[in-house]
């Protein structure tokens, strides 16, 4: 199915559009569930966590594994509560411990020690 291929290629906006078409055209409960799940994953990939939560909420009673859906919702709500820092900075970026500091402190100490030993 094209929508899942787009999702796998991380083309989230295109995948979301295809899943919305599937939702509009779906007549069976299972295809509706799959379309909503795909929309939620696409929205999450695009960073629209509120939209993803809304889709997962719509699935809460219909999905085969309600505990898994509830877990996804709670995980996304947790991500909404966390302040966003620089991309890839994680905790180290907040503490100021980065590549430069580690390299400078460790590198200088090693060089000084090597000079004394020689």
Image (spheres, helix red, strand yellow):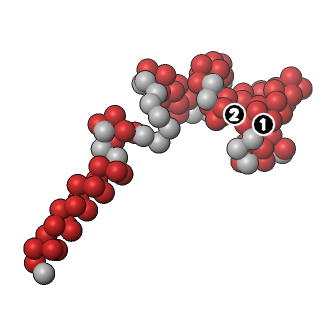
Q: Is residue 117 above or below residue 30?
A: below
Residue 93's disc is none
Tell which of 111 and 98 is nearer to you: 111
Residue in view at x 43 percent, y 24 percent: 83
Residue in view at x 78 percent, y 36 percent: 15
The answer to whether one can see residue 28 in this image is no
- What is the quadrant of the C terminus in the image? bottom left
The answer to whether one can see residue 118 in this image is yes
Residue in view at x 47 percent, y 42 percent: 88
- What is the quadrant of the N terminus in the image? top right
**Badge 2: residue crowd in 10 Å (few <14, some 14–19, many ≥20):** many
Q: Is residue 98 above or below residue 33?
A: below
Residue 42's disc is 2
Q: Looking at the image, tell me whether mark 1 or mark 2 is earlier in sequence order.
A: 1
* Residue 20: x %, y % from top left: 81, 26
- Residue most toward the right? 25
**Badge 1: residue crowd in 10 Å (few <14, some 14–19, many ≥20):** many
Left or right: where 48 falls relative to 89: right
Residue in view at x 64 percent, y 35 percent: 45
Q: Quadrant of residue 105?
A: bottom left
Q: Disc 1 on helix, strand or loop? A: helix
Left or right: where 26 falls relative to 74: right
Tell which of 106 and 67 is nearer to you: 106
Q: Quadrant of residue 25?
A: top right
- Residue most toward the bottom? 118
Q: Which residue is mark 1?
A: 15
Q: Is residue 32 above or below residue 54?
A: below
Q: Disc 1 and disc 2: Cα gap in Å? A: 6 Å
> Are the residues flagged by discs 1 and 2 in contact, CB closer than 8 Å?
yes
């Amino acid at each position: 199915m094209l929508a899942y291929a787009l999702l796998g290629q991380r083309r989230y906006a295109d995948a979301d559009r295809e899943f919305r078409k599937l939702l509009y055209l779906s007549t069976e409960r299972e295809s509706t569930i799959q379309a909503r799940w795909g929309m939620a994953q696409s929205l999450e990939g695009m960073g629209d966590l509120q939209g993803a939560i809304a889709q997962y909420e719509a699935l809460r009673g219909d999905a085969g594994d309600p505990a898994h859906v509830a877990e996804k919702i709670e995980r996304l709500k947790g991500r909404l509560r966390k302040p966003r820092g620089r991309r890839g900075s994680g905790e180290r970026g907040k503490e100021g411990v980065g590549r430069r500091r580690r390299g400078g402190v460790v590198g200088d100490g090693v060089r000084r020690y090597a000079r004394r030993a020689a």
